[in-house]
Amino acid sequence: MREQGTGNRGQGRRGRPGTVDRGRGAFCGWGWLSLGALALLALALPLRADTFFVTVAGLGGEPDYVQRYTADAKALDQAFRQGGADAHVTTLIGADATRERLTQVLQQVAAAAKPGDDFILVLIGHGTYDGVEYKFNLPGPDISAGELAALCDHVAARRQLVVDSTEASGAALAVLEVPGRRAVIAATKSGTEKNATVFARYFVEALQDPAADLDKNQAISGLEAFEYAQRKVADFYSSQKRLATEHAINAEPKLLGSITLVRFGQAQKAYADPAKRALLAQKEEIERKIDALNYQKDALSDEDYRNQMTALLLQLAKIQKEIDL
């Protein structure tokens, strides 16, 4: 398990110190790249496919928690449905949020999802950890992290995200994570943080607030939503003058940054336009390649970095121009 704060982001998203400026400098001085090379780069970019969203509002217990968890789940349902026809959204609330029903839904996703698709599972509610096993609390029998992991393993999507916003969720992170394939967000850093959390509230808010869009590409990634919620949780405890009883963590931050949760503004309009959707998919793929290159830049020579960054920035500018037409 790895704790990731805003100061531990490495060199991922554009806009981080030492990343964009270096790339833009290369763009200004490396105009010799051929259009043929850029065309080949475009052809190599895979188009995005579908996204499967499953949100579960688990057992609330007290009326206040039931109301809060239901409201959060409904807000996520609404946000995810803005993805249009390519967004397959299932939200389980109240008596429908049972282990049996959740198992059926995840089996249905496994039957439908393709390797090129994305899969996001969000757990809202209470969790428990007995020192050995984490369980997500549901009406009737609970479901363990191991059972959830086994169900997710059958989903072919190569980009997956599990957001566990419950108390004690840190104990589930190592069980659910699959390096390079499944990113995990947990509201607590361990299974011993057992007070009810507020993380879900601010994760939902992140998908509704353009301020969460740190790289200003009119899309909120999993990493941006995590960092927004993490900051807001810290501000909540500080403003309440309370000792923080939850410390969110994530695994696979690089993968987390590559998963788009929602789009807004011109990006959302472009995604809804069949004529521009392929261009937007290429744009987002180039942005992921820029992120990956920034993660790797310390292992590259300056010349290699400039060559690769220049090619990506030129193609990004070209595609953005076509989207804006």
Image (cartoon, rainbow, N blue to C red):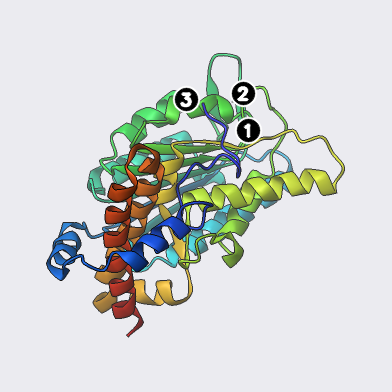
**Disc 3 versus disc 1: distance between alpha carbons?**
13 Å
Q: Mark 3 is on which residue type? A: Ala
| Residue at the image position 43 percent from the left and 77 percent from the top | 266
Q: Secondary structure under badge 1?
A: loop
x and y, in percent, of residue 53 in the image: 41, 52
Report the amino acid beneath label 1: Thr
Classify residue 50 by image quadrant. bottom left
Tell me the number on the disc at residue 174. 3
User: Can you say whether 182 is above or below 70 in the image?
Assistant: above
Up the image or down, 265 lies above or below 88; here it is: below
Report, in whole angstroms, how far the alpha carbon at label 3 lies from the one at label 2.
11 Å
Q: Residue furthest top?
A: 132
Q: Secondary structure at mark 2?
A: loop
For residue 278, say whether it is visible: yes
Graded by Cα atoms within 10 Å as few (under 14), some (14 to 19) or many (20 or more), the crowding at tag 3 reads: few
SS for dot 3 = helix
The reply to whether the C-beta atoms of the residues labelled 3 and 1 are less than 8 Å apart is no
Instruction: Give the quadrant of the C terminus.
Output: bottom left
Is label 3 in contact with label 2 (beta carbons under 8 Å)? no
Q: Which residue is mark 2?
A: 191
